[in-house]
């Protein structure tokens, strides 16, 4: 056989062997895969890795609803870790029967309620009073204003102050607070305080909102009282 013919016979065999042989890096990857996934090999020497790769995934049925995979829609039930609002628990506020005076019946109309509707700030609420507009435009906000109310129209005994504003130049005080007392008790308490101090007292109401207001010379007060959602009352007190 000539040299040329021998070369022609051996060349296809060499090409076939070269095609069948994978590059060294690919062989290394295949070997690593076998060691990680096959029962035989390195996994037998590492029980923890074998269990992690082959054991069945465990699912807690009680928690599957908490996944909330449909993020566009709210979950089908409340978040088990969320806490509901803390209810207002009535407690002794130190108010005695002698401290109360039944408020007069509410008149059929409530202009003061319409004035207060939609007010977003204490300053805006005060500005809607017919004679407090210019004074209310220059109020400043600080919790200390709640401690500077006149003695005749103070905070209710268990008041929890939320916000306070005032203007020293014109003697304006505006305080927003919450109380565990019901609406009627707060109205009767303020009615007793203001009438004994010589103020007039007019009771207005619209729906759940009640307003008690009056004057004494140049001084005036307005008390807005509304039932709170969790119990008790929400109160806005204006004094000038």
Image (tube, helix red, strand yellow):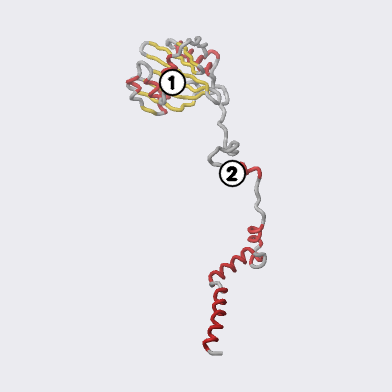
Q: Residue 130 is drawn in which quadrant?
A: top left
Quadrant where the N terminus lies? bottom right
Judging depth in this view, the residue of 113 and 194 nearest the camera is 113
Q: Secondary structure at mark 1?
A: loop
Nearer to the camera, 121 or 221: 121
Q: Residue at x 62, y 66 (%)?
A: 34
| Residue, disc 2 | 67
Q: Residue at the location (37% across, 10% down)? A: 217
Question: Helix, strand or loop at disc 2?
Answer: loop
Residue 86 in the image: state x and y as whole percent: 56, 30
Cα distance between the residues tagged 2 and 1: 42 Å
Label number found at residue 236: none
Q: Quadrant of residue 88?
A: top right
Residue 66 sits in quarter? top right
Q: Label 2 crowding class (10 Å Cα cut-off): few <14, some 14-19, many 20+?
A: few
Badge count: 2
Q: Nearer the viewer, residue 25 or 203?
A: 25
* 82 vs 171: above or below: below
| x and y, in percent, of residue 39 in the image | 67, 64
Q: Assign the C terminus to one quadrant of the image.
A: top left
Q: State the residue at coordinates (67%, 54%).
A: 56
Query: For mark 1, does the 10 Å Cα neighbourhood hold few (<14), some (14 to 19), or many (20 or more) residues?
Result: few
Q: Which mark is residue 117?
A: 1
Q: Percent x, y for residue 14?
A: 55, 79
Indicate the position of residue 196 as horizontal and vertical percent values.
46, 11
Q: Are marks 2 and 1 in contact (CB under 8 Å)?
A: no
Task: Name the mark nearer the viewer: 2 or 1.
Answer: 2
Of the residues under marks 2 and 1, which one precedes in the sequence? 2
């Amino acid at each position: 056989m000539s040299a040329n013919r021998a070369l022609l016979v051996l060349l296809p065999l060499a090409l076939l062997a070269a095609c069948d042989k994978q590059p060294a890096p690919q062989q290394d990857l295949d070997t690593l895969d076998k060691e990680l996934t096959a029962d035989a090999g390195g996994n037998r020497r590492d029980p923890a890795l074998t269990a992690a790769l082959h054991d069945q995934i465990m699912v807690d049925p009680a928690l599957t609803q908490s996944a909330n995979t449909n993020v566009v829609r709210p979950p089908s039930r409340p978040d088990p870790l969320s806490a509901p609002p803390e209810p207002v628990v009535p407690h002794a506020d130190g108010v005695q029967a002698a401290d109360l005076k039944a408020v007069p019946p509410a008149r059929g109309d409530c202009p003061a309620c319409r004035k207060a509707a939609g007010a977003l700030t204490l300053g805006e609420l005060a500005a809607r009073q017919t004679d407090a507009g210019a004074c209310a435009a220059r109020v400043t906000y600080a919790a200390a204003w709640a401690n500077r109310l006149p003695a005749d129209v103070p905070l209710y005994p268990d008041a929890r102050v939320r916000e306070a504003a005032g203007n020293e130049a014109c003697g304006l005080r505006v305080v927003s607070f919450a109380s565990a007392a019901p609406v009627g008790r707060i109205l009767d308490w303020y009615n007793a305080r203001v009438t004994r101090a010589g103020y007039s007292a007019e009771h207005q109401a619209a729906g759940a909102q009640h307003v008690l207001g009056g004057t004494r010379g140049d001084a005036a007060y307005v008390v807005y009282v509304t039932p709170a959602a969790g119990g008790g009352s929400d109160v806005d007190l204006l004094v000038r």
